[in-house]
Amino acid sequence: MMQVIATDAYSYKHLAQMLDGYDCPAILVSLDYQILATNQNYRKEFGDVSIQASPRCYEVSHGYSVPCDDAGEDCPLSAVLASGHKERVLHIHQTPRGKEHVDVEMLPIFDDDGKPQFFIELLKPVAVTSVGHENGTLVGRSKRFNAMLEKITRVSKSDASVLLLGESGTGKELVAQAIHQSSGRESKSLVTLECAGLTDSLFESELFGHVKGSFTGANNNKTGLVELANGGTLFLDEIGDVPLSMQVKLLRLIETGTFRPVGSATVKHTNFRLICATHKNLMKMVGEGSFRQDLFYRINVFPIYVPTLRDRMEDIPLLVSNLLNRISKQKEYYLTDSALQRLKGHSFPGNIRELSNILNRAIVLTDTNIIDVVTIDECLSIDYEEYDDAFLDVKKTITKGEEEPHLVDLKTAEKNYLAELMTIFQHDKDKVAKVAGISLRSLYRKLEN
């Protein structure tokens, strides 16, 4: 904090000169929200501001006619006045490129009586997100989305372990990527391990690697993911599915940064930032004894809740635009207003993944580049009872030869079961994954093995 007396243009000029000492966009603001000066980084990022016109920060940044808190948003200046120290908020600002998320930090400058007289506002664009489809991996502007994004921007610069919580299909992997890309480890690798469906031995081999001959089928040395993540970030997706017998080895890795490849006596060291994700209630699992309490507190340093699509329905138009551009890069598709309203009335148990599937289906069903409410209704009215009937047929097929039982190992039985499903559903992997009760990612992995 700074303490100055500034009552004339000369003092304003000297205060303004301080702004160029900041390596990010910065402005000098008066007690009544007037922008008194901008630095070179601000002008480069957001454009010139006519100081002679006595512009207010809320007018320039948001197009409001009243301060942010009167327009229903958090105001950093008001927050500073209330607390007496610097404050930080996440805002959506108008820029020459359109609306963008900006991490705003407000620093007070006090007079001799200890009262705030000026404010230095530091503005740092959040590169990993967008309120449109032009840039970024995370898309949204709702209150719940912004609350999550603010936590992402806060934790990214540290090395604290992050636990992402939320339902399946909410985009936890994209959040992990955003944290990594905003961190000091962005030049190194983000290494992902999908923990669901892994046996003890496979989990250990994937995570720590193995040496040739350490077990049947180990024909070559294999580098583990923790070694590949050295200097970068390790993302353990569905951490709640880690076998209990492996949790103690994972705990030791996190605590000491050391590990041994399977079959090796050599201890290796690694340095990574840990991000975990789960859709399960880990606290409940701790109480049930299926998840170690000490491991839970190791990974739960900084929890972030990834909101469901039901919690952020106002983001659907942005998400639809973004997803349509990802799905079809050759042809532009648009939804009518009535189609958008119909989507807003859907509960989306599958979250963003379900929305993506619906839009994929709609593109196939529409004859033009305009997706109307009739098409969306058709996409939403699929008879899921057909899945149950087909599942019963599969069970009958699998149990048909019970009079002459033929026993096979569990892995072969699983492969046979999935092959039957693929045949019945004509290789529609979304339907097969739903009937089998596994994620689409897990299905791809099982089909490849």
Image (cartoon, rainbow, N blue to C red):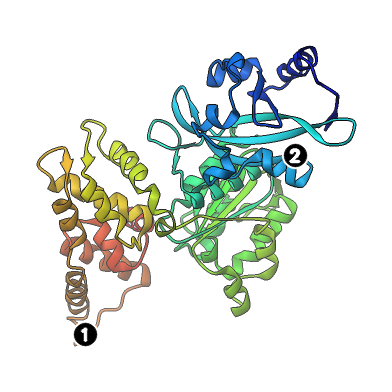
Residue at 82% x, 21% y is 6
Residue at 20% x, 50% y is 361
The percent coordinates of residue 200 (x first, y second) are 53, 65
Rendered image: mark on residue 402: 1
Residue placed under numbered mark 2 in the picture: 86
* Camera-side residue of 163 and 215: 163
* Residue 419 shown left or right of residue 229 in the figure: left
* Camera-side residue of 179 and 231: 179
The percent coordinates of residue 184 (x first, y second) are 65, 34
- In the picture as drawn, the residue positioned furthest to the bottom comes out as 403
Q: CA distance from mark 2 to mark 1?
A: 73 Å
Q: Quadrant of the N terminus?
A: top right
Q: Is residue 374 above or below residue 133?
A: below
Q: Earlier in the sequence, mark 2 or mark 1?
A: 2
Q: Is residue 278 above or below residue 386?
A: above
Does residue 120 appear in the picture of this structure? Answer: yes
Q: Amino acid at mark 1?
A: Glu
Within the image, what quadrant is residue 282 found in? bottom right
* Camera-side residue of 71 and 333: 71
